[in-house]
Image (tube, rainbow, N blue to C red):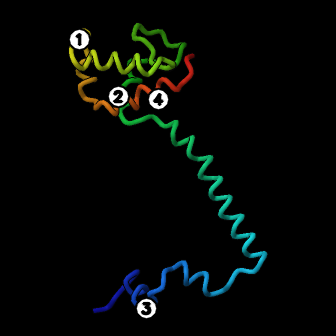
Amino acid sequence: MVKTGLARHRSSNPRPLWERVVAKRPLSHKGRGKYLLQIASLLALLCVAHPAAAAEAPPGASACSGCHAMDAAVATPVPRLVGRKPAEIIAALAAFKSGQRPATVMDRIAKGFSDSEIRAIAEWYGAMEAP
């Protein structure tokens, strides 16, 4: 049986990749500084990219924007969710879900969301600034 790919490399050299790379040539003083600078740059990039990822809409939030306009210039009788307190949105969806609040469509939409999804959507809309 012929080993291919990663299995072949593991059997021929059992040491971890990190040890093989570092052991081949020790870093000089300048090399260590450059290496540390690269690691620091990567960490800084990850820290900067993290808030952008948090601003993405949670699953299910796109269903809301079809009726609940995000832009103040759009005239609609449906209330806006942007800038509302998350507790208000959670309470309204819970009332729709249980049938306590009359609705044409929202009762069916609310029943499709879990409690954690409702909380994530409410917090996402609450974190936005009202127009």
In the image: residue 77, left or right of residue 99: right
* First along the sequence among labels 2 and 3: 3
**Residue type, mark 2 in image:** Ile
Which disc is residue 118 wearing? 2
**Residue 53 locus on image (x, y percent):** 52, 42
Q: Which residue is mark 3?
A: 12
Q: Residues within 10 Å of mark 2 (few under 14, many from 20)?
A: many
Above/below status of 58 relative to 73:
below
Q: Which residue is mark 4?
A: 124
* First along the sequence among labels 2 and 1: 1
Give the residue drawn at x 38%, y 29%.
Answer: 119
Task: Work out which quarter of the rendered image holds the N terminus and state it.
Answer: bottom left
Report helix, strand or loop for mark 1: loop
Report helix, strand or loop for mark 2: helix
In the image: residue 130, left or right of residue 35: left
Q: Which image quadrant for residue 91?
A: top left
Q: Residues within 10 Å of mark 4 (few under 14, many from 20)?
A: many
**Distance from Cα at disc 3 to Cα at disc 4:** 51 Å
Q: Which image quadrant for residue 123?
A: top left
Report helix, strand or loop for mark 4: helix
Q: Residues within 10 Å of mark 3 (few under 14, many from 20)?
A: few
Which disc is residue 100 wearing? 1
Give the residue drawn at x 40%, y 16%.
Answer: 88
Confirm or deny contact between disc 1 and disc 4 (CB under 8 A). no
**Residue type, mark 4 in image:** Trp
**Residue 129 locus on image (x, y percent):** 57, 21
